Amino acid sequence: MSQHDRKNDRTHDRINPVPLPTDQELVLKVIPMPADCNANGDIFGGWVMAQVDLAGAVLPARHVRGRMATVAVNQFIFKQPVRVGDILSFFSKVERIGRTSITVKVEVFAERFRSQGEFFKVTEASLTYVAIDAQGQPTPIA
Ligand SMILES: CC(C)(COP(=O)(O)OP(=O)(O)OC[C@H]1O[C@@H](n2cnc3c(N)ncnc32)[C@H](O)[C@@H]1OP(=O)(O)O)[C@@H](O)C(=O)NCCC(=O)NCCS
């Protein structure tokens, strides 16, 4: 996809609501509050990253059934701003299960408080979690 196509794609997503994914699981819903804002009055990116990290851990936890740690944020794209009062839905799916690690995709959709039923993709990310033992060392996934 060219840079021009990517820009058009982003504009299209911003203006047009998108269908929610059917091949991913809803793992978290949360509504950001004024305390989560940056100086522009939009929601602070670090707050969104923390929620994505929590949401991304849900599916790996089913496989690991023990301690795990986030080893990598492979990709993180803020496609459009999140606003106070947006109802955020976090969808996730497992992309890869390795010997000790699991990589997941997380997509975040905002439902504007005043226009519920329409969803806009605000963030997408890929994260890797590692199963760790009591000493904090990687351990095979059962
Ligand atoms: C997670 C941790 C235990 C991994 O230890 P390590 O010695 O780097 O582990 P290894 O090199 O043996 O790799 C373990 C797995 O992680 C994967 N991995 C390691 N670095 C990675 C990276 N940068 N990106 C993606 N996967 C990675 C490896 O491919 C391997 O997966 P596999 O067994 O499924 O093939 C260690 O890096 C750690 O403690 N990091 C800090 C974690 C943490 O505090 N997270 C919260 C941040 S606030």
Image (cartoon, rainbow, N blue to C red):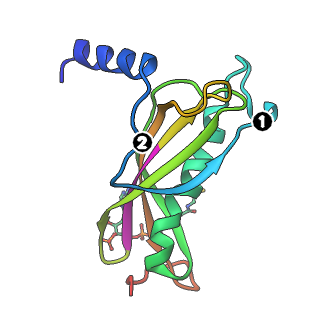
| Residue type, mark 1 in image | Met
Residue under pointer 1: 33
Q: Where is residue 130 in the image (x, y as percent from the top left)?
A: 44, 70
Helix, strand or loop at label 1? It is loop
Q: Quadrant of residue 31?
A: top right
Q: Quadrant of residue 42?
A: top right
Identify whether 101 is placed above or below 12. below
Left or right relative to 40: residue 71:
left
Identify whether 131 is placed above or below 124. below
Query: Which quadrant holds the N terminus?
Result: top left
Identify whether 119 is placed above or below 73. above
Based on the picture, tell me whether residue 104 belongs to the magenta stretch.
yes
**What is the magenta range?**
101-107
Q: Position of residue 117 (x, y in %)?
A: 54, 34
Q: Which of 19 and 58 is in front in this view?
A: 19
Q: Residues within 10 Å of mark 2 (few under 14, many from 20)?
A: some
| Residue type, mark 2 in image | Leu
Residue under pointer 2: 20
Q: Does the residue labelled 1 lie within 8 Å of ligand 1?
A: no
Helix, strand or loop at label 2? It is loop
Q: Where is residue 129 in the image (x, y as percent from the top left)?
A: 45, 65
Query: Which quadrant holds the C terminus?
Result: bottom left
Left or right relative to 46: residue 140:
left
Based on the picture, tell me whether residue 103 belongs to the magenta stretch.
yes
Left or right relative to 94: residue 85:
right
Q: Are marks 1 and 2 in contact (CB under 8 Å)?
A: no
